[in-house]
Structure formats: C-alpha cells, structure tokens
Image (cartoon, rainbow, N blue to C red):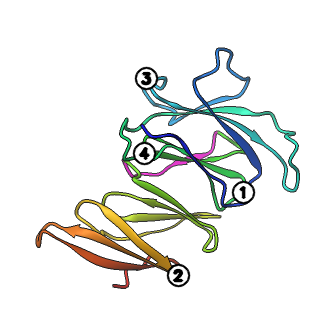
Amino acid sequence: MRAPEVDLSFPHYWQAEILPARPAILPTRHFVYPRDAEEIERGALEVLVKPHAPGETTVRVQPFLATCALGFRDPAVPTGVWAAPNPREICAVSGGYAYIIDTADPEHFTMIHYRPVLEVRALAKEGLLLFVGHHSVLAWGADGLEWETGKLSDEGVTITSIENGVLQGRGWDMLTDKERAFAVDLRSGEITG
C-alpha cells in the first residue's frame, strides 16, 4: 500500500489523525465501517476524528475512532482522508473502499459503491468530491450524491484535464481495442463528448 493521502481542500468542522495502528485502549466512541465487515482488524484504516462546532477550532464534541475496513492491498488504489463538500463530513478511503462519514453523527455514513475507488479528486471550486472507478465517475456534493456518469470505459478511466466545468478523459473500448476520449459536464454528470 502507498502512504495515506490527506486532502483538506474543503472547509471542515473536524480534525483527523490517521493512526499507525489501533490504540490499545479504545476511545469511548468507536465506529466500524461498514458495520458488517469481517476481519476488520486486517489492514483497516484507523482515524481518530475530533469534531468541532462551525467557526471554532477547539474540540467540544467527544472524539471518535473510525475503523475503516481495507478494500485492497494494492498501491494502485488510494488510502487516506479527504475533506468533503459538506463541512460536517469526512471521507476516509482504505485500500480503495471509500466511506463518507457524518462527524456530528458517526453512525450515519455512506459507502461509495465502487470496489475499488481508483482515484479521489477534490474540486473545491465546483463543490465536488470525485470518485473514479474502473468504468465511471461519481460526484459527491454538499447534499450527498450529485451524479454518476454512465459507462466511460470497459476497463480503466483516465482523467486528462478539468477545465471550465468540463472533465476530459480517456477510456478503453473493448470492441475496438482502443482508448477513446470523453468529456463530462461537471454540473450534471452528462457525457458531452
């Protein structure tokens, strides 16, 4: 696995620390993502999250430990913590498994359905957190899921640029055995080219 990433591009109402291992003494509040994970200890991402009120930097809410199940032990997939468009949410990614957690109510979370997420991109100007999968791209906004593209590739999506509200990329087409270019409108997720 590669070193964990930390991207705090969005304003956020929390502090987070990626721990090298699970603490010997667990904090009072401990949450496992997903809830029904088997063998959660093996390679799980352990994140100590300290929520705080808007406009404050002092932690007034009891911290919690987020134990995020590992997806894959592959350096090609991301692991780390990203701020999300909603300042109460944190995005934790463990070996390509991505979890959006409400830090004010940690029992409330969403697991992004890509297995695995291959890339995470924070687009602060557009207010989107992008998740790139093998076949498509999903955008998360302040109110949750904004959009998901249709199929962009039979195996592997490459983003080549993001300019003027348009994502440009390439994807492999199995029938022609060639890469083809595509464009996605970042406001709607509509494939425009």
Q: Residue furthest front?
A: 3
User: In 3D space, how far apart are the residues under numbered discs 4 and 1 (Cα atoms)?
Assistant: 22 Å
Query: Residue type at mark 2?
Result: Gly
User: In 3D space, how far apart are the residues under numbered discs 3 and 2 (Cα atoms)?
Assistant: 42 Å
Q: Sequence order check: which comes first, mark 4 or mark 3?
A: 3
Mark 4, secondary structure of its residue? loop
Q: Sequence order check: which comes first, mark 4 or mark 1?
A: 1
Identify the residue at image location x=31%, y=72%: 170
Mark 1, secondary structure of its residue? loop
Q: Sequence order check: which comes first, mark 4 or mark 2?
A: 4
**172 on left or right of 136:** left
Residue under circle 4?
Answer: 96
Mark 3, secondary structure of its residue? loop
Numbered range of the magenta stretch: 107-115
Residue 61 picture location, percent across and down: 83, 38
User: In 3D space, how far apart are the residues under numbered discs 4 and 2 (Cα atoms)?
Assistant: 26 Å
Q: Sequence order check: which comes first, mark 3 or mark 2?
A: 3
Residue under circle 1?
Answer: 87
**Foreground label between 4 and 3:** 4
Residue 39's disc is 3
Q: How many numbered marks have been drawn onto this rendered protein structure?
A: 4
Q: Sequence order check: which comes first, mark 3 or mark 1?
A: 3
Q: Is residue 46 one of those drawn in magenta? A: no
Residue under circle 2?
Answer: 165
| CB contact under 8 Å: marks 3 and 2 | no
| CB contact under 8 Å: marks 4 and 1 | no
Identify the residue at image location x=85%, y=40%: 59
